[in-house]
Amino acid sequence: MAHLGADVAAYVDGQLSETAMQAATRHLGTCDECAKAVRQQALLKSRMSTVATPAPPPRLLESLAGLASATPVRETWWERVCRSVPFRAGLVVVGASVAVIVAAYAVGSPDGTTGDTVVPPYDRYAADFSGATTVDASNTISDATMSQLDGSGWPCLATLAGDLRRTSGSYVDHHETVALSYSNGDAKLNLYEQTGVLDHDSLDGFKAAKMGSALVWIRDGVPMLVTWDDDGVVYTIATNADRGRIARAVAELPKGAYRQGPVGRVGDGLSRMTSWVNAA
């Protein structure tokens, strides 16, 4: 079966025929790219369902309630202009635009990411780095599969930071996390990738830091832990490499961008609303 493509939204909404749903379900069991698209679509629709309609200000409701008892007064020219059809039509357009902007701001993420909140098991990652970890052979990821993952938004680069070569890849945490190991014979780096948004409340012992154009959180020690999220994926590094090599590795991976301002958040929200309309 070909990729789901435009049928992703219909699959999430259960709008495909029974035969098509069964075929799509079988396809998702073997296609990580489509499975990721389905997860992201389901997360977006779930987020949209939680957006509440803004309540009008109490003073506005009070003023509207008092209009019926107000004493009629002679209208000025400006008041007559305000009552004109063109003027009122303009207000409708402006009001609709404001409503769209408010909705886009509510839907847009503060940092442009969406997904379930993730708390990576940092202590376990540190322990795995320091000890010998036995990986079940059934969880090992082949080079061919890693190439497919790399092309569908899960970076499985053959090398990092110039001379760190990929030595292994595996699925951990019930196949929810991709774990990759890199080494140059001296420095070692373990990289973990999982779907979701980084839970900032869980970052005890971490400090925010800038690495090039990336905003990351660092916990010093051996190994050093570095974590961030980008586009619905959380990345965590455990390594004994020097900070310069770590910064280069981060630069070669999808970066956690600095938090966007209101304009960026509205733009993010408008993009998501447009995608929902197109998928409907």
Image (tube, grey):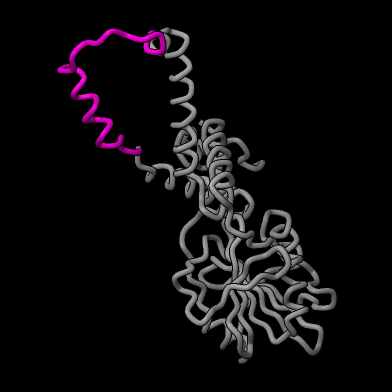
Is residue 74 at least partly visible in the picture?
Answer: yes
Where 237 sits versus 70, above or below?
below
Where 14 sits versus 108, above or below?
above
- Image coords of residue 182 (percent x, y): 74, 78
252 sits left or right of 260 in the view = right
Is residue 139 at least partly visible in the picture?
Answer: no
Extreme residue in the left direction: 69
- Image coords of residue 261 (percent x, y): 56, 51
Range drawn in magenta: 54-80
Within the image, what quadrant is residue 48 found in? Answer: top left
* Residue 96 is a magenta residue: no
Q: Nearer the viewer, residue 90 or 163?
A: 90
- Image coords of residue 205 (percent x, y): 51, 82
The residue drawn where x is 77% and y is 79% is: 244
Task: Work out which quarter of the rendered image holds the N terminus and state it.
Answer: top right
- Image coords of residue 32 (percent x, y): 62, 55
The residue drawn where x is 61% and y is 85% is: 220
173 sits left or right of 99 in the view = right
109 sits left or right of 143 in the view = left
* Residue 74 is a magenta residue: yes
The residue drawn where x is 60% and y is 67% is: 228
Q: Nearer the viewer, residue 45 or 113?
A: 113
Where 30 sits versus 57, above or below?
below
How many badges with numbers are in the image?
Answer: 0
